[in-house]
Image (tube, rainbow, N blue to C red):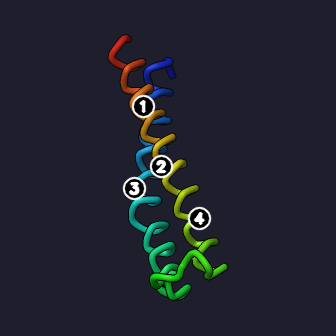
Amino acid sequence: MNYLDKLQIKLTALRAKLRQMENEDIDKITQRRIDADMGDDYKENEGAKHVMEQHDIWYIRRVAIKKEIASLKRQMRAL
């Protein structure tokens, strides 16, 4: 197995993780937002604050995975 094959396997795994995050994980966060009753006063609602923090962490992880995918694509093109 050469370096390009290893990059391809890693790229496939990252794409699968990103797909899961964008489909399943965001649905869970959305349901939690609904359950936390995020109305106009969500800044005073501790449950809603926690959900928003989870959403922010989810977004940061999503962006990091997208950057890593782009980096792998650049490496693969260079080969």
Q: Residue at x 51, y 40 (%)?
A: 64
Q: Amino acid at mark 2?
A: Arg
Q: Label 3 crowding class (10 Å Cα cut-off): few <14, some 14-19, many 20+?
A: few
Distance CA(mark 1)–CA(mark 4): 30 Å
Disc 3 to disc 4: CB gap under 8 Å? no
Q: Nearer the viewer, residue 18 or 46?
A: 46
Q: Nearer the viewer, mark 2 or mark 4?
A: 4
Residue at horizontal 40 percent and vertical 60 percent from the top: 22
Asked if the residue at tag 1 contacts the one at tag 2, i.e. Cβ–Cβ closer than 8 Å, the answer is no
Question: Circle 2 is placed at which residue position?
Answer: 62
Crowdedness near tag 4: few (<14), some (14–19) or many (≥20) residues, C-alpha within 10 Å: some
> Three-letter amino acid code at disc 1?
Gln
Tell me the tag on residue 54: 4
Q: Earlier in the sequence, mark 2 or mark 1?
A: 1
Sequence-wise first label, 2 or 4: 4
The x and y percentages for residue 66 are 42, 40
**Vertical comparison of 53 with 72: above or below:** below
Residue mark closest to the camera, 1 vs 3: 3
Identified at 57% across, 75% down, the residue is 43
